[in-house]
Image: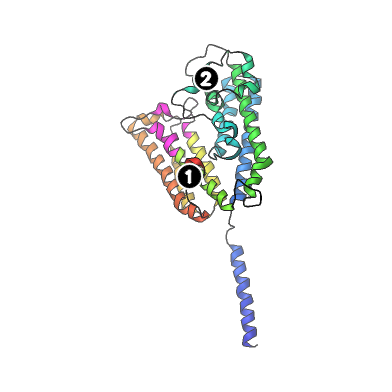
């Protein structure tokens, strides 16, 4: 065998070996997988869960009977709530679905005017025009878990609120499957004025993950945590229904699932998520009442620190893997 032939054989062998090595490694996921495997199923779950809630409310307004579908629908919303762009932002839907925080109590005030009011105000078209503070999960929570007994019959408002949630969820899913998913999946294609490059999609999703973690740290945990000398458990999200900790946990799980689908090659970020999730699962304080005690406060602060550490890992490792940065302002979704 001549040297030239030997070199040719060696080159073929190396090429074949390189191909095998590449094939043996983990597949590089990206935003198309994230859209198809996480976002679209998430919005489908939300639509189905709110439809179940509305159907159950049509049968009964008993809070005990509505508790399970109410919590299932809220869980489904938390799968996708962190994504503050696209159809959920159209027409103020996200705010109407979950108006919180509400430091001035606007929701309770607007909702009070609807209890026992003209039934025409509760018709679908009219109710959709009501203040976003008077709609959504927090309004339904006030009806199902009232701080004090409500004098008037709340059943019509319970049904109107549940129906409104189901309509918004259906509209969001329709818009995703009808157009917005394609807008993301065709980034960089001629005529796509929303995402001019594929990198813009990665940038947007990454920024939303970072913003979602920031919201958990600063709002869902930070507001009730207050300070060591002055904890504020009364400011906890969804305290009346005992979902304060659950909202933190489900949100972390949703963000982790999205991160893993978008970028499975971010082990430190995923490990940080796992640590924060484990801390949340071990924290036996559903409505954060326990933070009035110093030991309970410290446990919640440790969870807050773990969420912040997860965000910091994402800002370094995940950003590097995706080839993006935080952008101008995390809250803008840019």
Horizontal and vertical percent for residue 268?
Answer: 46, 53
Question: Can residue 212 be seen at all in this image of the molecule?
Answer: no
Q: Earlier in the sequence, mark 2 or mark 1?
A: 2
Q: Quadrant of residue 131?
A: top right
Question: Marks 2 and 1, Cα distance to the nearest angstrom?
Answer: 33 Å
Q: Which residue is mark 1?
A: 210
Where does residue 45 sit, x and y in percent of width and height? 63, 37
> Mark 2 = which residue?
110
> Which of the 4 image quarters holds residue 222?
top left
Q: Are marks 2 and 1 in contact (CB under 8 Å)?
A: no
Residue closest to the eye, 287 or 127: 127
**Is the image coloured rainbow, by chain, by secondary structure, or in one colour?**
rainbow
Residue sitting at 61 percent across and 40 percent down? 42
Q: Secondary structure at mark 2?
A: helix
Residue at 59% across / 32% down in the picture? Answer: 91
Magenta stretch: includes residue 244: yes
> With respect to residue 272, does 228 lie above or below?
above
How many callouts does the rendering have?
2
- For the record, the magenta segment spans 216-245
Q: Residue furthest bottom?
A: 2
Q: Residue furthest top?
A: 151
**Horizontal and vertical percent position of residue 81:** 54, 37
Nearer the camera: disc 2 or disc 1: 2
Label 2: few (<14), some (14–19) or many (≥20) C-alpha neighbours in 10 Å: some
- Residue 77 - label: none
């Amino acid at each position: 065998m001549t040297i030239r032939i030997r070199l040719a054989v060696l080159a073929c062998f190396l090429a074949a070996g390189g191909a095998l090595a590449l094939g043996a490694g983990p597949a590089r996921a990206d935003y198309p997988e994230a859209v198809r495997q996480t976002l679209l199923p998430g919005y489908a779950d939300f639509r189905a869960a709110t439809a179940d809630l509305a159907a159950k409310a049509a049968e009964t307004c008993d809070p005990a009977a509505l508790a399970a579908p109410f919590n299932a629908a809220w869980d489904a919303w938390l799968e996708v709530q962190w994504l503050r762009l696209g159809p959920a932002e159209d027409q103020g839907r996200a705010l109407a679905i979950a108006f919180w925080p509400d430091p001035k109590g606007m929701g309770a005030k607007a909702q009070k005017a609807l209890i026992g009011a003209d039934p025409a105000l509760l018709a679908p078209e009219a109710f959709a025009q009501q203040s976003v503070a008077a709609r959504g999960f927090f309004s339904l929570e006030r009806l199902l878990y009232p701080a004090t007994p409500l004098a008037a019959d709340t059943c019509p408002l319970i049904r109107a609120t549940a129906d409104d949630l189901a309509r918004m969820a259906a509209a969001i899913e329709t818009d995703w499957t009808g157009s917005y998913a394609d807008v993301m999946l065709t980034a960089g294609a001629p005529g796509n004025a929303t995402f001019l490059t594929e990198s813009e999609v990665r940038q947007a999703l990454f920024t939303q993950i970072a913003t979602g973690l920031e919201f958990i740290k600063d709002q869902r945990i930070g507001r009730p945590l207050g300070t060591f000398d002055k904890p504020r458990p009364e400011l906890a999200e969804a305290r009346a229904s005992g979902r304060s900790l659950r909202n933190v946990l489900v949100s972390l799980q949703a963000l982790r699932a999205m991160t893993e689908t978008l970028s499975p090659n971010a082990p430190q970020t995923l490990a940080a998520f796992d640590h924060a999730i484990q801390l949340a699962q071990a924290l036996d304080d559903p409505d954060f009442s326990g933070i009035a005690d110093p030991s309970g406060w410290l446990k919640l602060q440790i969870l807050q620190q773990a969420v912040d550490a997860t965000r910091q890992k994402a800002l370094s490792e995940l950003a590097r893997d995706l080839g993006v940065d935080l952008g101008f302002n995390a809250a803008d979704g840019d």
